[in-house]
Every structure is written in C-alpha cells, then in structure tokens.
Image: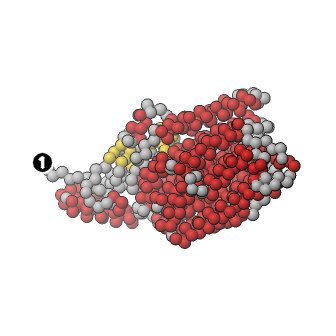
C-alpha cells in the first residue's frame, strides 16, 4: 500500500493536520474564556487533549506495517519563492512518538488539576501550544516547517518553568532556553547548508526532507561539518554528556506536568533527530562519529547513574537517571544495525512511559508533603499501599525487569551494541547495574522501614483521579514488556531502511563509481541498451529517481537506498515503481537496470 492509497482509504481526510493543530485551536478558544471559570478551563483543556488522543489512534490502527514509505502524506505549496512547503507525513519511527505525545498530553492536563492554582488559563494555554509544537516536529517533512515547530515549542516550555516552577525557576528557565536556542542556531546552519548545496547541484532550492535525503550529494568534508552542526543541535536536546547541565535544573524547577512532558517527549526530539536526519543524510559521517558518540554515551550512562545515586532530592535523582537512560538510547542508535536502532527507538517510548510515571509519582507525594528530600520519608508502604504498588511497578519498569517494557528495549540495544563492540556492551551493562542500584535504594529508603516522621503517618493514598492518569502508563509497561511485537513490527521497515541508507556511500566519488558499475552491468545485460543510453548520459541526463535541474516530474524515492524501490513524484504524488532485472543485489547499492526489450518483441 502506498501513502496515496492510505490517504484515499481515509477519504482524503487531513488527519495529520488535525492531530497537530487541535491543541492549538483549543488554546485559542481558551484565550476567550473567563479566567475565573477555572473548572471550565480545566475541563475544556482535558477534553481537547482527549480529542487529540482519539484522532491520533487511527494513525496506529490504519498504519501499514509492511512499508517504510511516508504515510498519510499531506503536501501543499506554502512559500514557493523559498522552496518551502506545507509537507506532513509519518513512518514507523514517528507514529509511536506521536501516540506517546498525545497520551502524555492528556495525562499532563489531568495531573495539573490540583497542582496548579495560579494563572490557570495561561498554564493550560501553554500546555496546549506546547503539544502542537511537539507534534509538528515529529510530523513535518519540510525543514522550514520542522524548524518552526522546533522553535515554537521552546516558548511555552520556558513559560511553564519560569512562571509555575520552583524557587529557582527563572534561572532554570533561562538556562533551558539559552542552551536549546544555541543548539537551534547550529541546526539552522546545517539546514541552510543542505539547502544551498542541493540547490547548487540540481538548481532546485528546496527544504523537502525526502528530496534532500535521497538527492543531495555531499563530499566527506561536507558530511563531517554538517553532521557536526546537526549533532550540536540534537545532542543538547537529548541531552548527551557534556551538554546535559541544563536538564537537572529544568526538571527540578518545572511543575509536575512540565517534567513529564520534558522527560517523556522533549528529550526524544534529540534522539529522533539523530535517527531521522543524521543517519540517512550523512552516512559516512555517521560511521566515522561512532567511536566519539559511543564514548560520550558511555560516559553519560555511567556518570548519570553515579550522580543519581548521590542525590538527596527524588526529582533530581530521576532527572539524572534520564541522562543515563538516554545515553543508553544513543549507544543503541549508533550501533548502526537493526537491533540497536530498533531497541533505541523502543527505549525512547519506554523511557517516556517509565520516567514520565516517576515524575508523576514525585508530584503525587510532593502535593501531600511539600518536600522531595528522600530523608523526609520512610515506611510509606504501611501508610499508602496503592501508591506503593504504583511506585514499585514503575521502578521495576525503569530498571528493566523482564516482563516490563524496559527489558525489551535494553535487551535489543545490548544485542545491537554487542555486534558493534563487546567493549561498548560491557560498559553499557555497568550502567544497567548502577541503574538498578539507585532505583532499588531509593525505593527501600522511601517505602520500607519504620514511619519515623509524624507527618507521614496520616498521608492520603492515591485518589481516583491519580489512579486514572497513572493507569494507562502502567498498562503499557506490561503490554510492551509481555508482547512487544506490534510496536517492533511498526518500527522494523523504517529502521531497516535507515540502516540500509547508512551503509550506502552517496558521496560524489561513490556516485561516479556506481555509474561506472552501472555501465558495466548494462553492457553485460544488453550492449545495445548501453549504446542507446550513452548519448542521453553524455547530455547530462540523471538516473531515474533523482531530480535534475529542469526536471518537471522527477521521481523522488520515499523508500529504499535511492537506487531501487518505490518513488513518489513531487508533482503528482503518484507512486513510481522502478523495474528491476536479475543482477547485483540491491543491498550493494547498485541500481537495477530496466528489462531490455529486443526490437520486434
């Protein structure tokens, strides 16, 4: 099934536009609601996020798991003079992140009903605008549009931390904004470099991500420097060591919903960026940077775990655990094999569920005791048993207990990393052991022992509202842990395609070599065909699937390594299928010639 057929199956319904902009529309409506109608504001914000969640479900149920092509695509001219389009689409890499975002959006609104008491209208408006920005990042297939969404989400998160945060909220908000803005500048430079290089090569100045991935030819030096620009932008967002210093302050000072969104979705934009852009756009640079990124990831894994173990504040402990866990994700992604990248992508979802749930747990206990210091608790299992069960399941999910979601992702990452380097895998295992140590020790100090402080003796257990917003997260921890196949089957085609792209050399030197190989192959199949095609080649014609400077209906591949497979015409969106003759394997990156017809047959 091609993206066009899937779109027709939905009746041409612009579902991606609706999923993206429903929260923004809700935020605009909220602006006209009386600030004193707090009940209406809360209820309306919750309904908007639930509607958005409902509209995102068909993206999962109607998703074609057999292809890596972009699905539910929407394309409209936007700024023709710049080559910018309103171009949306999703594949297996983005669909799970969209579902995670819409789920956590509803959870974040519901968990804020009691926690936020001042300027509630502005708070829920900020949450809804933030959700639109996050969804747009995962859906945009135009770099200009992507960058707008990337920047838009910084503003509401800045306000969430700076207005509704803790005692050091302004420091944390400004630090968050400056770090991420600095990374965005490098990202913009990299995008502009791709824009002008592609325009110079083809005469087509475009921000079309699919075109740039499959058509731009970068030298080894160009790949290195543009990869580095993208690396800085995404590494700050992950955050990787040593760009992580903004994260603990932002997490500790942010309100509960802000921490949930930050850990559950915003950090995933960095890892998503590496998988979506760095690997397919810069395959040789990605290979070259593996030792460097593996080193930073391993340092982050062990450093984050050791610092988390030393924390006295529950929230800061969970914040540093994110540095460790996301280092593990990056190590899996840059294993550059299907198991490692699939494990890294699944672990991004798992981290959003388990760490998001941990921040919700911190928020629940903070609302009752107004302290986050571990020493102020102890023996809580005797007082609040429901809370204890929820905490226990979430903690075991975070450390990767078999049967829960964390185990599946960690296992796949280890399998992939082991294939890349036994030494990398050994260091990663040390991080897993340390992660289990600090989480079990936290649970033991808080939940077991005697109830020594009088303030803890009459604590109220979880309310129905708190159980309701925790329940879906707990449910998915078990579902993914016991039966991960539906989620891995969505990821597998897209991940396999990206891994295949990383293994294909698309520098100009490699292109010349492939052209020579193609000539030899065509002569072997049909000498007359090679002679017929020689004049057109001398005239500057390009291979099928690569847009030329004056091409009116150049086919842009949305699948494969750029040599074979389905393609979509940018002018019509119709699929173009390249015929393949029995010859060299496609995995070798050699384009397959069309079957030659002898005259008169």
Give 236 or 268, whichever is nearer the viewer.
268
Q: Which residue is drawn at 58% across and 37% down?
A: 53
Q: Where is residue 556 in the image (x, y as percent from the top left)?
A: 39, 48
Q: Residue at x 52, y 71 (%)?
A: 422
Which secondary structure, mark 1?
A: loop
Whether residue 217 is visible: no
Give 516 or 129, whichever is nearer the viewer.
129
Assign the N terminus to one quadrant of the image: top left
Give neighbour class at mark 1: few <14, some 14-19, many 20+ (Cα, 10 Å).
Answer: few
Residue 495 relative to residue 121: left or right:
left
Residue 100 relative to residue 571: left or right:
right
Give 450 or 105, whichever is nearer the viewer.
450
Numbered marks: total? 1
Residue placed farthest to the right in the image? Answer: 454
The correct choice, above or below, for 265 with respect to 313 in the image is: above
Whether residue 514 is visible: yes
Q: Where is residue 102 in the image (x, y as percent from the top left)?
A: 59, 40
Residue 149 relative to residue 500: left or right:
right
Q: Residue at x 79, y 37 (%)?
A: 117
Residue 213 relative to residue 567: left or right:
right
Q: Name the residue under label 1.
A: 600
Q: Where is residue 587 in the image (x, y as percent from the top left)?
A: 36, 60
């Amino acid at each position: 099934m091609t993206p066009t057929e899937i779109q027709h199956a939905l009746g041409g319904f612009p579902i991606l536009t609706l999923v993206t902009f429903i929260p923004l529309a809700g935020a605009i409506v909220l602006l006209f609601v009386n600030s004193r109608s707090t009940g209406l504001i809360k209820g309306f914000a919750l309904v908007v996020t639930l509607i958005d969640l409902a509209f995102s479900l068909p993206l999962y149920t109607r998703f074609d798991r057999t292809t890596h092509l972009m699905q539910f695509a929407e394309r409209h001219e936007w700024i023709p003079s710049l080559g910018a389009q309103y171009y949306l689409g999703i594949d297996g890499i983005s669909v799970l992140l969209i579902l995670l975002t819409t789920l956590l959006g509803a959870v974040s609104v519901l968990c804020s009903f009691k926690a936020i008491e001042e300027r509630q209208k502005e708070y829920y408006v900020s949450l809804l605008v933030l959700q639109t920005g996050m969804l747009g990042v995962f859906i945009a297939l135009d770099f200009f549009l992507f960058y707008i969404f990337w920047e838009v989400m910084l503003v509401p998160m800045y306000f969430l931390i700076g207005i509704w945060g803790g005692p050091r909220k302004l420091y944390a908000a400004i630090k968050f904004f400056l770090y991420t803005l600095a990374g965005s500048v490098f990202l913009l430079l990299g995008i502009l470099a791709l824009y002008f290089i592609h325009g110079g090569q083809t005469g087509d100045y475009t921000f079309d991500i699919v075109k740039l991935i499959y058509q731009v030819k970068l030298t080894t030096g160009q790949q290195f420097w543009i990869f580095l620009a993208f690396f800085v932008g995404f590494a700050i967002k992950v955050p990787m060591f040593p760009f992580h210093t903004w994260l603990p302050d932002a997490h500790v000072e942010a309100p509960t919903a802000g921490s949930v969104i930050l850990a559950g979705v915003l950090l995933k934009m960095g890892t998503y960026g590496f998988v979506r852009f760095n690997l397919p756009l810069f395959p040789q640079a990605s290979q070259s940077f593996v030792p460097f990124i593996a080193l930073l990831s391993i340092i982050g894994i062990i450093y984050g775990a050791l610092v988390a173990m030393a924390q006295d504040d529950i929230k800061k402990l969970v914040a540093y655990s994110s540095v460790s866990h996301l280092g593990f994700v990056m190590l899996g992604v840059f294993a550059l094999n299907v198991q490692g990248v699939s494990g890294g992508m699944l672990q991004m979802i798992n981290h959003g569920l388990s760490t998001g749930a941990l921040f919700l747990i911190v928020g629940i206990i903070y609302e009752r005791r107004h302290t986050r210091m571990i020493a102020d608790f102890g023996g809580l299992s005797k007082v609040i048993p429901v809370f204890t069960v929820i905490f226990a399941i979430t903690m075991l999910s975070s450390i990767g207990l078999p049967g829960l979601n964390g185990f599946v992702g960690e296992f796949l990452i280890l399998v992939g990393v082991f294939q890349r380097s036994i030494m990398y895998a050994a260091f990663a295992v040390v991080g897993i052991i340390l992660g289990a140590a600090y989480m079990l020790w936290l649970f033991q100090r808080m939940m077991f022992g005697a109830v020594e402080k009088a303030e803890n003796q009459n604590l109220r257990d979880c309310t129905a509202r708190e159980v309701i917003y925790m329940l879906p997260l707990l449910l998915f921890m078990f579902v993914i842990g016991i039966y991960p196949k539906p989620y891995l089957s969505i990821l597998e085609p897209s991940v396999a395609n990206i891994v295949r792209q990383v293994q294909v050399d698309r520098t100009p030197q490699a292109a010349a070599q492939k052209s020579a190989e193609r000539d030899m192959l065509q002569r072997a199949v049909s000498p007359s065909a090679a002679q017929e095609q020689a004049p057109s080649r001398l005239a500057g014609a390009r291979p099928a699937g690569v847009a030329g400077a004056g091409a009116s209906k150049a086919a842009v591949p949305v699948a494969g390594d750029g040599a074979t497979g389905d393609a979509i015409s940018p002018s019509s969106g119709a699929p173009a299928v390249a015929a393949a003759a029995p010859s060299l394997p496609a995995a070798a990156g050699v384009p397959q010639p069309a079957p030659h017809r002898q005259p008169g047959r």
